[in-house]
Image (spheres, helix red, strand yellow):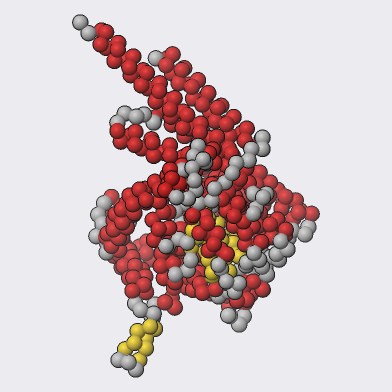
């Protein structure tokens, strides 16, 4: 029994070590892999391209540091695209306090690179609490609900907000999240006002989003880290992190597949030995 | 907008006193009366949103009178009220944590030093975060506070949060090795589908079928296209059915809660 426990102990630690090496090597050594763009990402890209110049894009950052491996590159790729096309955008979040702060750190260097001015070309409304009811009120009166931005500047003092009143001034909302928050926008923005909704989510949430994508309630989607890498490819974002991290994810996926095969091989061999032993033991 | 600033402070003071008095009076009521207030308040709250949603934006009566939805103007003030209530829940969480961890320190329970670490971390983050948001950042202390806040947020909070989630990858690898067993036909189909989706999501997996054409009938056998077919057709159909079921169940449960038809430990307890 003790021998079995020790065996399991060492096997687990060996797997942890192999996984660490498999993920670390691609991050330390530059390994570039070709990215093939899928249709959900392409649809989202084209939806952003189609946003009229007199409307804004709202990036809803309902993600936290725990999911930043996937959601941060998605946010960065989207902001890069918007900045490159000089489309006005606003950041905010209502489910995670960290989201708007982390998005601000991503947006500042990109906006500076393209000469975008805060308060004129882009703003960060910060974190607002209140969930569904607050979002409904926000859709009808954005300045009245927001009151001030992340730097406590009143809405009336921001040139960006001059022509932004309600949902009619929003050309696209892109929800980037690691939680099930897109339903709020689908119910209260798309459902009532038909505001286009885009989506960026973690890999595990992708299957749940396909019904909405198929029904047209979502105009496009970035599927986890691979979606971010595809979006970087489309937007021409060479300094993006997603492309570099895809090598690490590739190694990790292949390792898990190999572990499943090895685990099952061991299982079948052990079962055959047990059956042979049982047959041999019969009188 | 109020003409005089001091009027705002009087209104705030009056509201605090008024609500404190109301809570005091509610505490004096009997259990049955409290339950009745909860039932009526829940019903009226739900009724407002139901009526607001289903009542048309403009209703034409008798061709010479148009009536606007009378409930819609109240959406914004209610939305802002919910934001305020959301702020209360934050304070409620802090009070609860303070009571629990304060009790651990006071009684010197096992692991009391972890509770002490909690207070140090919470107060430090709150102090430097509030100073960064509302304090003067032009003074030497303001600049130092800003640097400390950034170190605590980026260096501690964000890094630790990401670390906790990163552990998932290692546990998933060991779970895949130990738990994924092909004990039946269904398990085999599940594992095969998982293989194809995982391979179709990463460039290394897509490389296996990179020789196939990107268009035409053979393109359907590329790993990324197989993965998208599994996600977009097979999995989506099942999930849509699940969503319908969940939606109908949620509607039924909401109706039961709204109309106070639900029974159980919480709904039967005395207040």
Residue nearer the viewer, B119 or B219: B219
Could you tell me which quadrant the C terminus of chain A lies in? top left
Could you tell me which quadrant the N terminus of chain A lies in? top left
Q: Is residue A265 above or below residue A273?
A: below
Locate residue A82, reporting x and y percent: 62, 62
Locate residue A245, reporting x and y percent: 60, 42
Report the side of A143 relative to A118 (left or right): left
Q: Is residue A12 above or below residue A31?
A: above
In this view, the residue farthest toward the left is A283
In this view, the residue farthest toward the top is A283
Report the side of B91 relative to B195 (left or right): right
> Residue at the spot x=51%, y=31% of the render?
A255
**Tally of numbered tags:** 0
Report the side of A273 relative to B177 (left or right): left
Residue nearer the viewer, B92 or A205: A205
Can I make out residue B247 in this image? yes
Locate residue A37, reporting x and y percent: 54, 51
Can I make out residue B22 in this image? no
In this view, the residue farthest toward the bottom is B64
Residue nearer the viewer, B14 or B86: B86
Q: Is residue A118 above or below residue A180?
A: below
> Residue at the spot x=52%, y=59% of the render?
A44
> Residue at the spot x=66%, y=61% of the render?
A84
Residue nearer the viewer, A166 or B225: B225
> Residue at the spot x=52%, y=41% of the render?
B210
Q: Quadrant of residue A268?
A: top left
Locate residue A24, reporting x and y percent: 61, 33
Q: Quadrant of residue B190?
A: top left
């Amino acid at each position: 029994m003790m021998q079995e426990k020790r065996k399991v102990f060492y096997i687990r630690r060996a797997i942890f070590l192999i996984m660490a090496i498999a993920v670390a090597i691609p991050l330390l050594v530059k390994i570039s892999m070709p990215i093939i763009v899928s249709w959900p990402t392409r649809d989202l890209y084209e939806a952003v391209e189609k946003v009229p110049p007199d409307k804004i894009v709202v990036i809803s950052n309902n993600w936290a540091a725990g999911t930043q491996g996937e959601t941060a590159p998605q946010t960065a790729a989207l902001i890069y695209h918007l900045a490159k096309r000089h489309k006005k955008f606003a950041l905010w979040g209502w489910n995670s306090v960290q989201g708007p702060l982390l998005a601000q750190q991503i947006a500042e260097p990109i906006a500076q690179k393209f000469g975008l001015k805060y308060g004129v070309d882009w703003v960060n409304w910060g974190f607002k609490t209140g969930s569904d009811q607050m979002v409904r009120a926000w859709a009808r009166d954005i300045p009245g609900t927001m009151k001030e931005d992340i730097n406590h500047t009143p809405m009336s003092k921001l040139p960006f907000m001059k022509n932004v009143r309600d949902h009619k001034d929003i050309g696209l909302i892109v929800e980037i999240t690691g939680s099930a928050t897109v339903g709020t926008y689908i119910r209260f923005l798309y459902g009532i006002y038909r505001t286009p909704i885009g989506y960026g989510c973690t890999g595990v949430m992708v299957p749940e989003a396909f019904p909405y994508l198929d029904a047209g309630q979502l105009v496009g989607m970035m599927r986890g880290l691979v979606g971010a890498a595809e979006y970087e490819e489309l937007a021409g974002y060479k300094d993006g992190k997603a492309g570099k991290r895809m090598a690490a994810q590739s190694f990790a996926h292949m390792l898990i597949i190999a572990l499943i095969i090895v685990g099952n091989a061991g299982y079948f061999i052990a079962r055959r030995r047990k059956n042979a032993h049982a047959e041999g033991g019969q009188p | 907008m109020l003409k005089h600033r001091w009027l705002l402070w009087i209104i705030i003071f009056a509201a605090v006193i008024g609500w404190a008095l109301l809570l005091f009076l509610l505490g004096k009521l009997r259990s049955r009366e409290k339950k009745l207030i909860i039932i009526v308040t829940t019903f009226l709250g739900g009724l407002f949103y139901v009526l607001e949603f289903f009542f048309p934006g403009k209703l034409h009566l008798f061709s010479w009178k148009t009536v606007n939805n009378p409930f819609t103007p109240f959406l914004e003030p209610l939305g802002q009220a919910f934001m305020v209530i959301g702020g209360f829940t934050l304070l409620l969480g802090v009070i609860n944590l303070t009571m629990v961890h304060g009790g651990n320190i006071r009684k010197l329970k096992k692991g009391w030093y972890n509770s002490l670490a909690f207070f140090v971390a919470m107060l430090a983050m709150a102090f430097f975060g509030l100073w960064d948001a509302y304090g003067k950042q032009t003074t030497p202390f303001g600049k130092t506070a800003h640097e400390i806040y950034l170190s605590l947020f980026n260096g501690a909070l964000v890094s630790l949060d990401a670390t906790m989630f990163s552990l998932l990858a290692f546990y998933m690898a060991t779970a895949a090795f130990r738990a994924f067993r092909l004990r039946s036909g269904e398990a085999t189909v599940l594992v095969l589908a998982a293989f194809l989706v995982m391979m179709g999501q990463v460039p290394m997996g897509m490389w296996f079928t990179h020789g196939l054409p990107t268009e035409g009938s053979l393109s359907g056998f590329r790993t990324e296209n197989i993965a998208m077919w599994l996600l977009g057709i097979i999995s989506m159909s099942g999930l849509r059915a699940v969503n319908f079921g969940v939606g109908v169940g949620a509607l039924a449960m909401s109706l039961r809660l709204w109309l106070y038809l639900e029974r159980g430990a919480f709904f039967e307890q005395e207040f």
